[in-house]
Amino acid sequence: MTFADIPNQTDLKQVLRHSVQRGHVAHAQLFRGAEGSAALALTLAYAQYLNCEGRAADADDSCGHCPACLKIKKLAHPDLNFILPTTTTKAVPKDATSGRFMADWRTFLAESPYQGFNDWMQHIGAENKQGSISKEEAGQLLKLVSLKAFEAAYKIVILWLPELMHPAAANAVLKLLEEPPPTTVFLLVTNEPERLLPTILSRVQSVVVRPFSEDDITNYLTAHYHVPEVKARQVAQLAEGNLGAAIASREQSADHDYADFFIKWMRKCYGLKMSDVLALADEFQKMGRENQKEQLSFSLGLLRKVLLYGLDPQLVPHLPSGEQQFVQGFSKFVTVRNADQLTEELNTAHYHIERNANPRMVFVDASLRMGQQLRQAQ
Ligand SMILES: [Zn+2]
């Protein structure tokens, strides 16, 4: 993985590059990012940049084709090690340490390095078992770092999800962080830093990874998966910065234009004409429950944009052209006076749909109440 493979994150990539170029590579770094963020992918790109043999000293990225790059890309470099949460499975009924799962890990990362813990558990066939970084892992880890780097400048240990460490494993890691073996770099990747021991937090350099923006996700889906732009944007808005979730749902998401429906819906609500609302309720009914829920989640997101736009258009940059005109016009009808109630209506509708209420009734009910709210904006 190269830095260029990862969307955006420009500033952070620069910080990481500089640390290497200036020879200030911290021996323990904690990449903190939400699930589906670039955190894990960045550690892979960073590891490759650190050990690339073919790049100029001040190059912006690893070369991608030297022997080290090729081995790291295939996750087959002897100095690139992984510690992962695992559990016993049909294929690995005992001694479930990370080393036994390397083949799975390679196919998992090849699918996408933006997936989360549950995806990984599914991938290894954990079924309903809880995964963790076991205490047996501690012994493996100590053995691992006692060896010198085989062929690269740095021995790298990527520890994915340290919040899932058994206390014995956490103790072993803590000892290593206190007395780091020379030329070994620990890259910890966490989704939940608040669950880590303060003693660990105090021994690592923090690397904060921001969630992907809607634009990042939209562009990634169109470029890598050829998702049409309107649909990609729709998926991106629902994903809330989680690229892994966006990739996973790119095909499940219906060929249904949520923005278009919302615009139509709000006009009918405001019109408060019963026959119009009923006709739209039929359309809503036909969507199916999963799409109904997505429509409501999407509507919440767009409503929030409308409110923000009304407060200050600068707060909502990069609106797709199809939504721009609507958001601008509609922002007169969504103000601090009714925004809470409108949000509440959409949340309530989502709640009822999730619990199998009649979609048509939920929709009509919400429409009538929202219509009244919209008329009370000023
Ligand atoms: Zn290289």
Image (cartoon, rainbow, N blue to C red):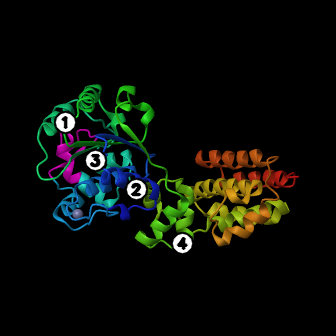
Q: How much space separates mark 2 and mark 1, taking CA atoms?
A: 26 Å
* In this view, the mark in front (4 or 1): 1
- Residue at the (15%, 39%) spot, across then down: 144
Q: Within 10 angstroms of label 1, few (less than 14), some, or many (20 or more) residues?
A: some
| Residue at the extreme front of the image, as rendered | 22
Q: Which mark is residue 181?
A: 1
Which image quadrant: the N terminus?
Answer: bottom left
- Residue at the (40%, 56%) spot, across then down: 13
- Hey, what amino acid is under mark 2? Lys
Q: Which residue is mark 2?
A: 13
- Magenta residues (range): 78-104
Q: Within 10 angstroms of label 4, few (less than 14), some, or many (20 or more) residues?
A: some
The front one of 280 and 24 is 24
Q: Which residue is mark 4?
A: 229
Residue 22, x across and y down, in percent: 32, 51
What is the quadrant of residue 360 in the picture? bottom right
Q: Within 10 angstroms of label 2, few (less than 14), some, or many (20 or more) residues?
A: some
Q: How much space separates mark 3 and mark 1, taking CA atoms?
A: 35 Å
Residue 49 visible from this viewpoint? yes
Q: Quadrant of ligand 1?
A: bottom left
Earlier residue among tags 3 and 2: 2
* In this view, the mark in front (4 or 3): 4
